[in-house]
Amino acid sequence: MQNSDEHNQSSTITEPLGWFYPVIFTLIVATAINLSAIYWLDFKWSTLLDFANYFGVYFLSSWFVRRYNSANNTQDPEKDLHPAYSWPMPAPIFRLGKFAPIFTYYPSILLSILNPFLLYQQIKQLVGQGIINGRIKHSPEQFANFQSKTQYRLPFNNEWLIYHGGHTPATSHSWNVLTQRYAYDFVMADEQFSRHKAKGNQVTDYYCYGQEIVAAADGEVVKVVDGLGDGFAVGYFVVDFLAREMAGNYIIIKHAEGEYGFYAHLLRHSIAPKVGDKVSQGQLLGMCGFSGNGTEPHLHFHLQDGESFYRSMGLPIKFNDLSINGELTKNECIIERGSRVKHNQVELKS
């Protein structure tokens, strides 16, 4: 579930093409190299060489996937460049140099393969991809032209910045991951687009951490996952490879028939509604946190056509009653990455 650009990894759940295929390739090839050296060459690997073998194969396979994706990208590269390339990186990793994320992000991703919870969820996601493909292959346009049955507002108050998200392959959160094709990652940023104050090595340094997340529309709660703590090493582009849930603490709300809102990476024990509760548009759901896969606090939100996170198709969504980059909009509109958005009515329903 993830964008392939190295610089803009800070606010995502993981896309299979982004890390899962290279990890599986690494697991097979590096193990084959290891066993071949032992049984054919009678060579005993040291722990250091073992790590070098696995990480070397992983870096090469990841590089090949990125080159392959770039070679098959027909979009204008200048137009596609993520706006985050001009935004400041978290201060701790920035002080280590612009190439530092390569030595923190990718090793943490590779270590995720050792986590049985994350591995199982990635396998479920891949199986779900096949199920969704089977459902939509004869009429993919029905989702691109989807019109919602209800009106949605932004799932927060105050002004937030769209880190990922849009309705095109160039702007999408994760175009190849059908559940999250139209998903959004939201953060808060100052005028210079920095997402944190102070050093940025504490979750409380981040402007969006602990901010209220509200219901985008009326609905009924169908699933809640809570009780998961924050990740570690915030500000250093380290993915929490010890997490038990990719999405961290999350809540799924049925807003209409075939329309389910997915709100992820919430703060532990902050989710107020329970399964079966009715919620009103604008009602407090929980607080933004740093749980699950991600490299800094953010809100992941998307609309999907079923209750299952793994087997549901993502749906395009338009929002009402908002301002975009300070300009008021009165009609339903699409929002895209790089924009600052704010709900116009800040009254919170109880």
Image: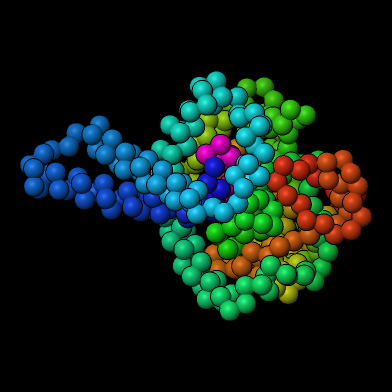
Residue at 25% in and 31% down: 48
Q: Seen in the image, is 325 located left or right of residue 16?
A: right
Instruction: Pinpoint residue 247: horizontal percent, then vertical percent.
Output: 57, 52
Residue 8 colored magenta? yes
How has the structure been colored for display? rainbow
Instruction: Pinpoint residue 55: horizontal percent, then vertical percent.
Output: 33, 39
Viewer-proximal residue, 263 or 331?
331
Viewer-proximal residue, 181 or 222?
181
Does residue 293 appear in this view? no
Please say if 7 is above or below 243: above
Q: Seen in the image, is 275 located left or right of residue 72?
A: right
Residue at 49% in and 62% down: 125
What span is in magenta? 6-13
**Can you say which quadrant of the picture contains the C terminus?**
bottom right
Residue at 15% in and 48% down: 36
Residue at 53% in and 71% down: 133
Please say if 330 is above or below 111: below
Would you say the magenta stretch is mainly helix, strand or loop? loop
User: Can you tell which quarter of the image residue 47 is in?
Assistant: top left
Instruction: Pinpoint residue 238: horizontal percent, then vertical percent.
Output: 50, 36
Instruction: Pinpoint residue 246: horizontal percent, then vertical percent.
Output: 53, 51
**Can you say which quadrant of the picture contains the N terminus?**
bottom right
Does residue 198 appear in this view? yes
* Tag count: 0
Please say if 138 is above or below 173: below
Q: Residue furthest bottom?
A: 138
Residue 102 colored magenta? no
